[in-house]
Protein backbone atom coordinates (compact mmCIF):
# COMPACT_ATOMS: atom_id res chain seq x y z
CA UNK A 1 0.00 0.00 0.00
CA UNK A 2 1.43 3.36 -1.05
CA UNK A 3 2.21 5.85 1.69
CA UNK A 4 0.36 9.15 1.78
CA UNK A 5 2.57 12.13 0.88
CA UNK A 6 3.87 14.21 3.78
CA UNK A 7 2.95 17.40 1.95
CA UNK A 8 1.10 18.50 -1.16
CA UNK A 9 1.25 21.59 -3.33
CA UNK A 10 -1.88 23.68 -3.86
CA UNK A 11 -2.36 26.35 -6.54
CA UNK A 12 -3.14 29.75 -5.01
CA UNK A 13 -5.22 30.70 -8.08
CA UNK A 14 -7.49 27.74 -8.77
CA UNK A 15 -6.88 25.33 -5.85
CA UNK A 16 -5.50 22.48 -7.99
CA UNK A 17 -3.29 20.03 -6.07
CA UNK A 18 -0.08 18.22 -6.96
CA UNK A 19 2.18 15.80 -5.07
CA UNK A 20 5.28 17.68 -6.29
CA UNK A 21 6.13 21.28 -6.98
CA UNK A 22 5.72 22.50 -10.56
CA UNK A 23 6.52 25.93 -11.91
CA UNK A 24 3.26 26.18 -13.84
CA UNK A 25 -0.14 25.02 -12.62
CA UNK A 26 -1.44 22.22 -14.88
CA UNK A 27 -5.05 23.41 -14.47
CA UNK A 28 -5.09 27.25 -14.75
CA UNK A 29 -1.54 27.56 -16.19
CA UNK A 30 -0.53 30.25 -13.66
CA UNK A 31 3.19 30.58 -13.02
CA UNK A 32 4.75 30.16 -9.54
CA UNK A 33 1.37 29.70 -7.87
CA UNK A 34 1.97 26.31 -6.19
CA UNK A 35 2.31 26.49 -2.39
CA UNK A 36 3.33 23.64 -0.10
CA UNK A 37 0.86 22.57 2.57
CA UNK A 38 0.03 19.53 4.70
CA UNK A 39 -2.54 17.11 3.24
CA UNK A 40 -5.98 16.83 4.82
CA UNK A 41 -6.93 13.26 5.70
CA UNK A 42 -10.30 12.35 4.19
CA UNK A 43 -13.01 11.24 6.57
CA UNK A 44 -14.24 7.68 6.13
CA UNK A 45 -17.94 7.03 5.83
CA UNK A 46 -19.20 4.40 8.22
CA UNK A 47 -22.58 2.80 7.79
CA UNK A 48 -25.49 4.51 6.03
CA UNK A 49 -25.00 7.95 4.44
CA UNK A 50 -26.03 10.85 6.70
CA UNK A 51 -29.46 12.39 6.34
CA UNK A 52 -29.66 16.01 5.11
CA UNK A 53 -30.02 18.73 7.75
CA UNK A 54 -33.26 19.91 6.14
CA UNK A 55 -35.56 18.07 3.70
CA UNK A 56 -36.12 19.27 0.14
CA UNK A 57 -39.04 21.67 -0.31
CA UNK A 58 -40.83 23.20 -3.30
CA UNK A 59 -39.81 26.69 -4.37
CA UNK A 60 -43.40 27.91 -4.17
CA UNK A 61 -43.49 26.95 -0.47
CA UNK A 62 -40.50 29.13 0.36
CA UNK A 63 -41.00 32.53 2.01
CA UNK A 64 -38.71 35.50 2.63
CA UNK A 65 -38.70 36.98 6.13
CA UNK A 66 -39.18 40.71 6.54
CA UNK A 67 -36.04 40.96 8.66
CA UNK A 68 -33.86 39.13 6.11
CA UNK A 69 -32.42 42.39 4.72
CA UNK A 70 -31.76 45.41 6.95
CA UNK A 71 -30.15 48.81 6.44
CA UNK A 72 -26.59 49.39 7.62
CA UNK A 73 -27.00 53.11 8.32
CA UNK A 74 -24.72 54.01 5.37
CA UNK A 75 -26.86 54.72 2.31
CA UNK A 76 -23.96 54.42 -0.14
CA UNK A 77 -23.08 50.96 1.18
CA UNK A 78 -26.74 49.88 1.15
CA UNK A 79 -26.95 50.92 -2.51
CA UNK A 80 -24.03 48.65 -3.45
CA UNK A 81 -25.30 45.75 -1.33
CA UNK A 82 -28.65 45.89 -3.11
CA UNK A 83 -30.73 47.57 -0.42
CA UNK A 84 -29.08 46.51 2.82
CA UNK A 85 -27.23 43.76 4.64
CA UNK A 86 -28.69 40.26 4.31
CA UNK A 87 -28.73 38.08 7.43
CA UNK A 88 -26.45 35.07 7.05
CA UNK A 89 -24.51 36.61 4.17
CA UNK A 90 -20.71 36.70 3.85
CA UNK A 91 -19.24 39.87 2.32
CA UNK A 92 -15.62 40.05 1.15
CA UNK A 93 -14.15 43.56 0.99
CA UNK A 94 -10.93 43.92 -1.00
CA UNK A 95 -8.65 46.90 -1.46
CA UNK A 96 -5.06 48.04 -1.58
CA UNK A 97 -3.13 48.67 1.66
CA UNK A 98 -3.90 52.04 3.22
CA UNK A 99 -7.03 52.65 1.14
CA UNK A 100 -9.26 52.76 4.25
CA UNK A 101 -10.74 49.27 4.62
CA UNK A 102 -10.32 49.14 8.41
CA UNK A 103 -11.71 52.67 8.76
CA UNK A 104 -14.76 51.75 6.70
CA UNK A 105 -15.43 48.58 8.69
CA UNK A 106 -15.09 50.32 12.04
CA UNK A 107 -17.59 52.95 10.90
CA UNK A 108 -19.91 50.19 9.65
CA UNK A 109 -19.65 48.47 13.04
CA UNK A 110 -20.45 51.73 14.83
CA UNK A 111 -23.55 52.22 12.67
CA UNK A 112 -24.79 48.66 13.10
CA UNK A 113 -24.21 48.36 16.85
CA UNK A 114 -27.10 50.71 17.64
CA UNK A 115 -29.54 47.85 16.95
CA UNK A 116 -27.33 44.75 16.71
CA UNK A 117 -24.38 43.20 18.49
CA UNK A 118 -21.18 43.57 16.46
CA UNK A 119 -17.88 41.75 16.96
CA UNK A 120 -14.80 43.33 15.37
CA UNK A 121 -11.95 40.81 15.09
CA UNK A 122 -8.53 42.29 14.38
CA UNK A 123 -5.53 40.18 13.52
CA UNK A 124 -3.26 43.03 12.46
CA UNK A 125 -3.65 45.79 15.08
CA UNK A 126 -3.59 45.87 18.86
CA UNK A 127 -6.41 47.08 21.06
CA UNK A 128 -4.58 50.34 21.78
CA UNK A 129 -4.15 51.12 18.08
CA UNK A 130 -7.82 50.46 17.42
CA UNK A 131 -8.83 52.59 20.41
CA UNK A 132 -6.90 55.52 18.91
CA UNK A 133 -8.80 55.11 15.63
CA UNK A 134 -12.04 54.69 17.58
CA UNK A 135 -11.47 58.05 19.30
CA UNK A 136 -10.37 59.79 16.09
CA UNK A 137 -13.45 58.70 14.19
CA UNK A 138 -15.72 59.72 17.06
CA UNK A 139 -17.68 56.46 16.92
CA UNK A 140 -19.52 55.04 19.92
CA UNK A 141 -21.74 52.14 20.81
CA UNK A 142 -22.27 49.76 23.74
CA UNK A 143 -22.78 46.68 21.56
CA UNK A 144 -19.50 47.01 19.61
CA UNK A 145 -17.01 44.38 20.81
CA UNK A 146 -13.33 43.98 19.95
CA UNK A 147 -11.33 40.75 19.79
CA UNK A 148 -7.63 40.70 18.87
CA UNK A 149 -7.17 37.09 17.80
CA UNK A 150 -6.08 35.15 14.71
CA UNK A 151 -6.90 31.57 15.74
CA UNK A 152 -10.03 30.55 13.86
CA UNK A 153 -11.23 28.09 16.50
CA UNK A 154 -10.76 30.63 19.31
CA UNK A 155 -12.69 33.28 17.37
CA UNK A 156 -15.58 30.89 16.70
CA UNK A 157 -15.63 29.96 20.38
CA UNK A 158 -15.98 33.62 21.35
CA UNK A 159 -18.71 34.04 18.72
CA UNK A 160 -20.70 31.22 20.31
CA UNK A 161 -20.25 32.87 23.72
CA UNK A 162 -21.51 36.39 22.90
CA UNK A 163 -23.66 35.50 19.82
CA UNK A 164 -22.95 38.57 17.64
CA UNK A 165 -25.32 39.52 14.82
CA UNK A 166 -22.48 40.90 12.70
CA UNK A 167 -18.87 39.66 12.61
CA UNK A 168 -16.03 41.68 11.04
CA UNK A 169 -12.79 39.78 10.32
CA UNK A 170 -9.78 42.03 9.58
CA UNK A 171 -8.27 40.23 7.76
CA UNK A 172 -8.89 36.75 6.35
CA UNK A 173 -5.19 36.37 5.48
CA UNK A 174 -4.26 36.36 9.18
CA UNK A 175 -6.51 33.42 10.14
CA UNK A 176 -4.94 30.10 11.11
CA UNK A 177 -5.99 26.85 12.72
CA UNK A 178 -4.03 24.26 14.71
CA UNK A 179 -5.64 21.54 12.59
CA UNK A 180 -3.35 22.48 9.68
CA UNK A 181 0.42 22.77 9.76
CA UNK A 182 0.74 25.42 7.04
CA UNK A 183 1.50 29.06 7.90
CA UNK A 184 -1.15 31.80 8.15
CA UNK A 185 -1.94 33.24 4.74
CA UNK A 186 -1.40 29.95 2.92
CA UNK A 187 -4.03 28.56 0.58
CA UNK A 188 -5.23 25.95 3.07
CA UNK A 189 -5.45 28.32 6.06
CA UNK A 190 -7.28 31.06 4.12
CA UNK A 191 -9.72 28.63 2.49
CA UNK A 192 -10.51 26.70 5.65
CA UNK A 193 -10.76 29.85 7.77
CA UNK A 194 -13.21 31.45 5.35
CA UNK A 195 -15.17 28.20 5.09
CA UNK A 196 -15.50 28.04 8.89
CA UNK A 197 -17.07 31.51 9.08
CA UNK A 198 -19.28 30.86 6.05
CA UNK A 199 -20.61 27.74 7.75
CA UNK A 200 -21.15 29.66 11.00
CA UNK A 201 -22.98 32.49 9.19
CA UNK A 202 -25.33 30.12 7.38
CA UNK A 203 -26.03 28.14 10.55
CA UNK A 204 -26.83 30.96 13.01
CA UNK A 205 -27.85 33.71 10.54
CA UNK A 206 -25.08 36.16 11.43
CA UNK A 207 -23.69 38.46 8.74
CA UNK A 208 -19.91 38.30 8.23
CA UNK A 209 -17.53 40.85 6.71
CA UNK A 210 -14.15 39.50 5.57
CA UNK A 211 -11.27 41.80 4.61
CA UNK A 212 -9.09 40.60 1.75
CA UNK A 213 -5.81 42.26 0.83
CA UNK A 214 -4.87 42.93 -2.79
CA UNK A 215 -1.63 41.51 -4.19
CA UNK A 216 0.79 43.25 -6.56
CA UNK A 217 -1.08 41.91 -9.61
CA UNK A 218 -4.27 43.66 -8.43
CA UNK A 219 -6.17 40.51 -7.43
CA UNK A 220 -7.34 39.40 -4.00
CA UNK A 221 -4.63 37.56 -2.06
CA UNK A 222 -5.27 33.91 -1.33
CA UNK A 223 -6.99 31.25 -3.42
CA UNK A 224 -9.20 32.41 -6.28
CA UNK A 225 -11.95 30.13 -5.00
CA UNK A 226 -12.36 32.50 -2.03
CA UNK A 227 -14.33 34.84 -4.28
CA UNK A 228 -16.61 31.97 -5.32
CA UNK A 229 -17.25 30.88 -1.74
CA UNK A 230 -18.60 34.21 -0.44
CA UNK A 231 -21.93 35.84 -1.30
CA UNK A 232 -20.73 39.37 -2.08
CA UNK A 233 -17.36 40.70 -3.28
CA UNK A 234 -16.87 44.45 -2.84
CA UNK A 235 -13.88 46.29 -4.31
CA UNK A 236 -12.76 49.38 -2.40
CA UNK A 237 -11.03 51.59 -4.97
CA UNK A 238 -9.30 54.94 -5.05
CA UNK A 239 -5.89 56.55 -5.01
CA UNK A 240 -4.38 57.33 -1.64
CA UNK A 241 -3.43 60.76 -3.03
CA UNK A 242 -7.10 61.45 -3.85
CA UNK A 243 -9.80 62.09 -1.27
CA UNK A 244 -12.52 60.07 -3.00
CA UNK A 245 -13.10 56.35 -2.52
CA UNK A 246 -15.45 54.13 -4.52
CA UNK A 247 -17.04 50.82 -3.58
CA UNK A 248 -17.99 48.55 -6.48
CA UNK A 249 -19.66 45.15 -6.35
CA UNK A 250 -17.71 42.57 -8.37
CA UNK A 251 -20.17 39.87 -7.26
CA UNK A 252 -23.52 40.11 -5.49
CA UNK A 253 -25.95 37.25 -5.01
CA UNK A 254 -28.56 39.61 -3.56
CA UNK A 255 -28.46 42.60 -5.90
CA UNK A 256 -26.97 44.31 -8.92
CA UNK A 257 -23.23 44.49 -9.59
CA UNK A 258 -23.54 47.82 -11.45
CA UNK A 259 -24.05 50.12 -8.47
CA UNK A 260 -21.28 52.16 -6.85
CA UNK A 261 -20.94 53.98 -3.54
CA UNK A 262 -18.87 57.16 -3.31
CA UNK A 263 -17.07 58.31 -0.16
CA UNK A 264 -14.64 61.07 0.75
CA UNK A 265 -11.75 60.36 3.11
CA UNK A 266 -11.25 63.00 5.82
CA UNK A 267 -9.66 63.34 9.24
CA UNK A 268 -12.86 61.98 10.83
CA UNK A 269 -13.04 58.96 8.55
CA UNK A 270 -15.13 58.32 5.46
CA UNK A 271 -17.97 60.68 4.58
CA UNK A 272 -20.75 59.62 2.22
CA UNK A 273 -21.16 61.57 -1.04
CA UNK A 274 -24.85 61.21 -1.97
CA UNK A 275 -24.47 63.58 -4.95
CA UNK A 276 -21.03 62.90 -6.50
CA UNK A 277 -21.75 64.80 -9.74
CA UNK A 278 -21.84 68.18 -8.00
CA UNK A 279 -18.62 67.42 -6.13
CA UNK A 280 -16.77 66.28 -9.25
CA UNK A 281 -17.75 69.42 -11.19
CA UNK A 282 -17.10 71.87 -8.34
CA UNK A 283 -13.52 72.63 -9.43
CA UNK A 284 -14.06 72.50 -13.18
CA UNK A 285 -12.09 75.31 -14.93
CA UNK A 286 -13.86 77.76 -17.23
CA UNK A 287 -12.91 78.77 -20.79
CA UNK A 288 -10.20 76.13 -21.11
CA UNK A 289 -9.67 73.93 -24.15
CA UNK A 290 -9.56 70.15 -23.78
CA UNK A 291 -12.36 69.98 -21.21
CA UNK A 292 -15.80 68.43 -21.69
CA UNK A 293 -18.50 67.23 -19.29
CA UNK A 294 -19.81 63.72 -19.83
CA UNK A 295 -22.57 61.59 -18.30
CA UNK A 296 -22.37 57.86 -17.66
CA UNK A 297 -24.59 55.44 -15.76
CA UNK A 298 -23.27 53.52 -12.76
CA UNK A 299 -26.10 51.09 -12.18
CA UNK A 300 -29.20 53.23 -11.71
CA UNK A 301 -27.20 56.37 -10.85
CA UNK A 302 -26.31 58.92 -13.57
CA UNK A 303 -22.86 60.30 -12.92
CA UNK A 304 -21.58 63.55 -14.47
CA UNK A 305 -17.85 64.15 -14.47
CA UNK A 306 -15.26 66.27 -16.23
CA UNK A 307 -13.07 64.78 -18.95
CA UNK A 308 -9.75 66.52 -19.60
CA UNK A 309 -7.50 65.99 -22.63
CA UNK A 310 -4.15 67.44 -23.59
CA UNK A 311 -2.17 67.02 -26.82
CA UNK A 312 1.39 68.27 -27.17
CA UNK A 313 4.04 67.87 -29.87
CA UNK A 314 5.95 64.64 -29.30
CA UNK A 315 9.72 64.51 -29.14
CA UNK A 316 9.76 60.71 -29.29
CA UNK A 317 9.62 58.40 -32.28
CA UNK A 318 6.63 56.72 -30.67
CA UNK A 319 4.21 59.28 -29.11
CA UNK A 320 3.06 58.68 -25.54
CA UNK A 321 -0.50 57.71 -24.69
CA UNK A 322 -1.39 58.24 -21.01
CA UNK A 323 -4.87 57.59 -19.66
CA UNK A 324 -6.06 57.94 -16.07
CA UNK A 325 -9.59 56.67 -15.36
CA UNK A 326 -10.32 55.58 -18.96
CA UNK A 327 -9.46 52.35 -20.76
CA UNK A 328 -6.23 52.82 -22.71
CA UNK A 329 -7.35 50.46 -25.49
CA UNK A 330 -10.56 52.44 -25.92
CA UNK A 331 -8.52 55.64 -26.05
CA UNK A 332 -6.36 54.21 -28.84
CA UNK A 333 -9.50 53.27 -30.77
CA UNK A 334 -10.98 56.78 -30.46
CA UNK A 335 -7.69 58.39 -31.50
CA UNK A 336 -7.59 56.19 -34.61
CA UNK A 337 -11.16 57.15 -35.52
CA UNK A 338 -10.52 60.88 -35.07
CA UNK A 339 -7.29 60.78 -37.08
CA UNK A 340 -8.79 58.75 -39.91
CA UNK A 341 -12.17 60.49 -40.15
CA UNK A 342 -11.24 64.08 -39.22
CA UNK A 343 -7.60 64.19 -40.30
CA UNK A 344 -6.32 65.27 -36.88
CA UNK A 345 -2.62 64.46 -36.45
CA UNK A 346 -2.67 62.64 -33.14
CA UNK A 347 0.15 60.37 -34.39
CA UNK A 348 2.54 63.33 -34.08
CA UNK A 349 1.44 64.31 -30.57
CA UNK A 350 1.63 62.94 -27.06
CA UNK A 351 -1.90 62.50 -25.72
CA UNK A 352 -2.89 62.70 -22.05
CA UNK A 353 -6.43 61.92 -20.88
CA UNK A 354 -7.68 62.37 -17.32
CA UNK A 355 -11.02 61.76 -15.63
CA UNK A 356 -11.24 64.41 -12.90
CA UNK A 357 -11.67 63.33 -9.29
CA UNK A 358 -10.03 59.91 -9.68
CA UNK A 359 -13.18 58.37 -11.19
CA UNK A 360 -13.11 55.54 -13.72
CA UNK A 361 -15.42 55.48 -16.75
CA UNK A 362 -16.09 52.07 -18.30
CA UNK A 363 -19.33 52.75 -20.18
CA UNK A 364 -19.18 53.37 -23.98
CA UNK A 365 -21.52 56.34 -23.48
CA UNK A 366 -18.44 58.37 -22.47
CA UNK A 367 -17.00 58.10 -26.02
CA UNK A 368 -18.58 61.29 -27.39
CA UNK A 369 -17.42 63.46 -24.49
CA UNK A 370 -13.91 61.97 -24.66
CA UNK A 371 -13.76 62.58 -28.42
CA UNK A 372 -14.85 66.21 -28.03
CA UNK A 373 -12.25 66.77 -25.29
CA UNK A 374 -9.55 65.30 -27.55
CA UNK A 375 -10.61 67.46 -30.51
CA UNK A 376 -10.71 70.55 -28.31
CA UNK A 377 -7.30 69.72 -26.86
CA UNK A 378 -5.48 69.29 -30.19
CA UNK A 379 -7.16 72.22 -31.95
CA UNK A 380 -7.06 74.51 -28.88
CA UNK A 381 -10.69 75.47 -29.51
CA UNK A 382 -13.18 75.88 -26.69
CA UNK A 383 -16.32 73.95 -25.91
CA UNK A 384 -19.19 75.84 -24.22
CA UNK A 385 -19.12 75.49 -20.44
CA UNK A 386 -22.87 74.84 -20.58
CA UNK A 387 -22.39 71.79 -22.84
CA UNK A 388 -22.58 68.14 -21.78
CA UNK A 389 -22.28 65.14 -24.10
CA UNK A 390 -22.93 61.41 -24.06
CA UNK A 391 -23.01 58.76 -26.78
CA UNK A 392 -21.06 55.83 -28.20
CA UNK A 393 -18.68 56.48 -31.10
CA UNK A 394 -18.32 53.89 -33.87
CA UNK A 395 -15.39 53.21 -36.18
CA UNK A 396 -17.07 55.08 -39.04
CA UNK A 397 -17.42 58.17 -36.88
CA UNK A 398 -21.13 57.54 -36.24
CA UNK A 399 -22.68 58.36 -32.86
CA UNK A 400 -24.71 55.41 -31.59
CA UNK A 401 -27.65 55.49 -29.21
CA UNK A 402 -27.22 54.64 -25.53
CA UNK A 403 -29.66 53.39 -22.92
CA UNK A 404 -31.50 55.43 -20.28
CA UNK A 405 -31.10 58.75 -22.11
CA UNK A 406 -33.97 60.24 -20.09
CA UNK A 407 -32.15 59.77 -16.77
CA UNK A 408 -28.97 61.30 -18.17
CA UNK A 409 -30.84 64.34 -19.48
CA UNK A 410 -32.58 64.88 -16.14
CA UNK A 411 -29.26 64.80 -14.28
CA UNK A 412 -27.70 67.24 -16.75
CA UNK A 413 -30.63 69.65 -16.38
CA UNK A 414 -30.48 69.41 -12.60
CA UNK A 415 -26.81 70.41 -12.65
CA UNK A 416 -27.50 73.47 -14.78
CA UNK A 417 -26.36 72.40 -18.27
CA UNK A 418 -28.33 74.13 -21.04
CA UNK A 419 -26.89 72.35 -24.10
CA UNK A 420 -27.11 68.57 -24.15
CA UNK A 421 -25.37 66.74 -27.00
CA UNK A 422 -26.72 63.23 -27.48
CA UNK A 423 -27.25 60.63 -30.24
CA UNK A 424 -29.99 61.56 -32.67
CA UNK A 425 -31.67 58.17 -32.22
CA UNK A 426 -32.01 58.88 -28.50
CA UNK A 427 -34.14 61.94 -29.23
CA UNK A 428 -37.66 60.71 -28.51
CA UNK A 429 -40.90 62.35 -27.53
CA UNK A 430 -40.34 61.14 -23.97
CA UNK A 431 -37.41 63.53 -23.54
CA UNK A 432 -38.87 66.71 -22.12
CA UNK A 433 -36.67 69.58 -20.94
CA UNK A 434 -37.54 72.95 -19.39
CA UNK A 435 -37.45 76.16 -21.37
CA UNK A 436 -33.93 77.39 -22.08
CA UNK A 437 -32.42 73.91 -22.37
CA UNK A 438 -31.51 72.72 -25.87
CA UNK A 439 -31.21 69.08 -26.95
CA UNK A 440 -28.74 68.64 -29.82
CA UNK A 441 -29.04 65.32 -31.61
CA UNK A 442 -26.11 64.19 -33.77
CA UNK A 443 -25.66 61.10 -35.90
CA UNK A 444 -21.90 61.50 -36.50
CA UNK A 445 -18.91 63.24 -34.99
CA UNK A 446 -18.86 65.65 -37.94
CA UNK A 447 -22.13 67.25 -36.78
CA UNK A 448 -20.59 68.07 -33.39
CA UNK A 449 -17.68 70.10 -34.82
CA UNK A 450 -19.63 73.43 -35.15
CA UNK A 451 -19.91 73.51 -31.35
CA UNK A 452 -16.16 74.20 -31.08
CA UNK A 453 -15.39 77.91 -30.89
CA UNK A 454 -12.01 79.62 -31.41
CA UNK A 455 -10.44 81.52 -28.55
CA UNK A 456 -11.24 85.21 -28.27
CA UNK A 457 -9.03 87.21 -30.63
CA UNK A 458 -8.64 84.27 -33.06
CA UNK A 459 -10.32 84.11 -36.44
Image (cartoon, helix red, strand yellow):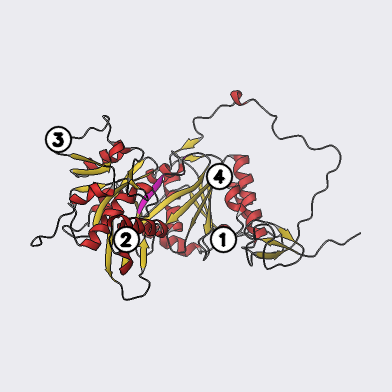
Left or right side of 307 for 112: right
Left or right side of 358 for 36: right
Left or right side of 403 for 372: left
Can you give x and y, in whole percent of width and height, for residue 10 in the image? 69, 61
Q: Which residue is mark 2?
A: 354
On whether residue 260 falls in the magenta region, the answer is yes
**Secondary element at image label 2:** strand
* Labels 4 and 1: the sequence-earlier one: 1
Whole-Å distance between the Cαs marked 3 and 1? 54 Å
View extreme (right): residue: 1
Query: Between 170 and 430, which is closer to the camera in this rendering?
Result: 430
* Labels 2 and 3: the sequence-earlier one: 2
Whole-Å distance between the Cαs marked 2 and 4? 34 Å
Whole-Å distance between the Cαs marked 1 and 2? 29 Å
Q: Which residue is mark 3?
A: 435
**Secondary element at image label 1:** loop
Q: Which residue is mark 4?
A: 231
Whole-Å distance between the Cαs marked 4 and 3? 48 Å
Query: Between 158 and 219, which is closer to the camera in this rendering?
Result: 219
Q: Which residues are magenta?
A: 255-263
Q: Which residue is mark 1?
A: 221
- Image quadrant in which the N terminus is located: bottom right
Image quadrant where residue 133 sits: bottom left
Residue 269 shows in the view: no
Left or right side of 133 for 458: left
Amino acid sequence: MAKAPKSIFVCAECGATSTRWVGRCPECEAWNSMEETAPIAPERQVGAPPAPKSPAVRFRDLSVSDYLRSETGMCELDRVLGGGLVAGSVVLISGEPGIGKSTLLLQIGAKLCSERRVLYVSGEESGGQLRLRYNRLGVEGDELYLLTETNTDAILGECRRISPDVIIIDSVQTLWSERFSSAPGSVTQVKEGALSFISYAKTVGAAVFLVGHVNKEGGISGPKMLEHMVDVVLCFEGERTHAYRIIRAAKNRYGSTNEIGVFEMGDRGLREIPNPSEVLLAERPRNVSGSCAGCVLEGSRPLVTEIQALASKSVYASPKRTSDGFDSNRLSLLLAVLERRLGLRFSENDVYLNIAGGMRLDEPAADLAVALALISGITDKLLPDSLIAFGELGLAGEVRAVSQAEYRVKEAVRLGFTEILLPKRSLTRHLKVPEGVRLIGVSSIYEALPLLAPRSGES
